[in-house]
Image: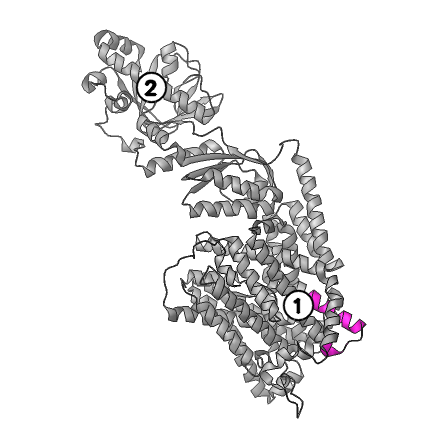
Amino acid sequence: MAGYDAVPTTQEPKAPKQSTLLACIYGLVASLMCAPVMMSFASIIFADPFFSEYSPELVKLVLFSSAVHQLCYVRWSTMPFAVGQVQDAGLIFLSSMARFVVADGLQHDDHAATTMAAALWTLGLATALLGVMLIVIGRLRLASLAQYLPVPVVGGYLAYIGFYCGQAGLAMMSGVEVTSLKDWPRLFRGSGPAKMCVGVVVASAIVLTSSIAEKRKWSRASKSLIMPFVLLATCVIFYVLLYAEGSTLAESREHGWVGALPARSEKGGSGWRNVPILKPWALYAPRNTNEVLRAVGRVAPRLIPSWLAMVCVVAFSSSLDVAAVEMELGSPLNYDSELQTVGLGNLASGLLGGFSGSYIFSQTILNVRSKVANRWSGAVVCLMEVLLVLFPAPPTAYIPTGAFGGLLLLVGASLIIEWLIEARHRFSAPEYLVLLFTFASIHVIGLEAGFAAGLAFSALAFACQYARVHDEVGGVACRRSKKARSVRRRSFEERRALHDHRESIVALDVVGFVFFGAAAQLLAKLKDEAKGAAWVVLNFEECVGLDATAARSCFAPFKQYLVQEKCSLLVAGLRPHVSEQLQWDSFVTTDQALESAEDSLLARFKVVKGSFSELSQEDGFDAILRPYVDGMQVDAKALTKYVEATSIKAGEHLFRQGDAADRVYFVRAGTVDLRLDQRRIARVARGAVLGELCFLLKRRQSLDATAHTHCALWCLSRDRLSAMKRERPDLFNVLQTALLKSMALQVEESLGSGIWSASS
């Protein structure tokens, strides 16, 4: 662990400083929110009825493991506000392993103490090795590999976690064993329904109060106290009713309304195993250690598939947590470094007999938003959990079981809503089918086999999707767009500004069906192309498909990267199914996106755009002509007598295709659209010239010119040009120079916009 400081990390994220006192207060708030959830997680990890008599001690072990995780994040995380605990992502795998150890112990007729110790040793070993793997992945900078795990498969697993949490909560409250849907009728026997109602009321009260807080815009600190206060109110109501009925706490424990107390030590017993504070750790060290080692040796090889799946899921979940914190923080985090921190937490927890964990992003984000800038908040969380461990009896022995069951119902409901209900709007139909298949497979054939079946089905679904579009595109690519400029024709000053700052706008084409296997490479390419840009235009017109994994692991981090680089993202050409995945606002065409980027660039550099409302009476013809003929003398008064001012309303035609090209126009204000066969190929704005090519070549107009807005123009007829040539050849030369430069700029812009305009 000492060598960890040498690992390259990003600079420690900075936040506005808060006082140490406020950081401690937020740490206390986080403790009040985390501790009850951690205690309820104990009932998930040790869901098998075998563990029920050890419940008080196991609750303390989960709390101690959470304290170890938090201590590691306080010491090694680059985020001083980080909160890390035993997390839900690995709970089901730990529970599955614990059940397997119990089944093996019963099969070999092991003593109960041996089976209990074997289960704890196995879970600790699995957690420690998980930590080693995460550290290795981080050291080798392979955190991006977790992004290759299909999101729908993980979504199906997380939905199953939600179901499992809800089921565990109901089983905890009713006091019966429930392992599958066929066992649910047991929940409704005896006093089960009444006990479950307590949890339902607790969960509903938290949801309702949170909804009211959201509508009335309570402060973040007030919202974070909702859950602790609901639990406190539950305890108060419980004890008031207990007193009113004349019942005792012991009777409530006997009937399952409150958790059990630890078993008393044997009279006359001596040694550390009989010290009350050390009793949880006595479970690891029965007197028949050799039998424990044999039991662990029997089950460990057969649990490797479960452990491998747990590594994948925890790595994926941890990267999601870091991404969520990074988006809230608004500054980059080193995923590999943070994954090593998670690995160190799991290694330390596992070596001390604990359980898997990771960042708790909800509490970490609360600290970010509260501007906690030092490590005192995390230290307080750790200290409070240690104090709960040192307390003679666990809090579960004094708080109604329905309170903890309600928290599990809440966790379960939130996961099911997010991944089974809301996910149908985020995923395509094939991907949502993969999610449902994974969820159902875990129910039917078990956790590891169901997860593997989900991966296989995901590969099949992807192959079918890719085969359908493979003929349309050859592969996934990101390339510089041929269209680097919009078709809008602008004034000379604006044209010069756009040319001088042309590297500020980067247009990229995303081509092909973007899938999870190409996400990491595509993200690296996008970041490389966007370096130094202030505006990035992403054109998806040739992107025929996108899966949810690529959306999360490529385009979401790319958007966040641009935010960190203070670069604006403009998106164009999203197809409906791609738009559903990204949920981004999009321009219809790339030209519209480029025009918007150019407008923003010109506004940043304060280049006058000129609308009809900005038109000045002093705005003479020479004001338009002068920038084109820099250094040449222009007689403004003489010039004006050769041109006439005119205006047209929005929607009116200036000229149509086939009309005689006997005039050239200079736009004073407003914009004019030039169209060829109903397709807009240019938008002419203030200071631009139109109609000059056909005018000089004496051809008929090749385009339609329609006012996009109310426009004011200067008009020069062929007769007035001939008069200028006779009377003022110096002005004629100036005008010819201006027209030549305008046409040269038009050619350059036509190449940049991907359109070669034959005439205007």
Q: Quadrant of residue 16?
A: bottom left
Q: Is residue 165 visible?
A: yes
Q: Position of residue 130 (x, y in %)?
A: 62, 61
Dot in front, 1 or 2: 1
Q: In this image, 607 relative to 703: left or right?
A: left
Which range is magenta? Answer: 94-114
* Front one among 170 and 562: 562
Horizontal side, residue 590 vs residue 271: left or right = left
* Magenta-colored segment: predominant secondary structure: helix
Give the amino acid at mark 1. Leu
79 or 209: which is nearer to us? 79
Q: Which label sits on residue 308?
A: none
Where is 742 relative to 585, above or below? above
691 and 483: which one is in front?
483
- Name above or below for residue 476 compared with residue 27: above
Can see residue 661?
A: no
Residue 215 appears in which quarter of the rendering?
Answer: bottom left
Disc 2 residue crowd, few under 14, some 14–19, many 20+, Cα 10 Å? some
The answer to whether residue 91 is above or below residue 498 is below
Q: Secondary structure at mark 2?
A: helix
Please check the rendered image and state whether residue 397 is part of the magenta-colored stretch, yes or no: no
Residue at mark 1: 123
Residue reaching furthest to the top: 726
Marks 1,2: beta carbons within 8 A: no
Looking at the image, residue 508 sits to the left or right of residue 631; the answer is: right
Q: Which residue is mark 2?
A: 741
| Amino acid type of the residue that numbered disc 2 sits on in the rendered structure | Lys
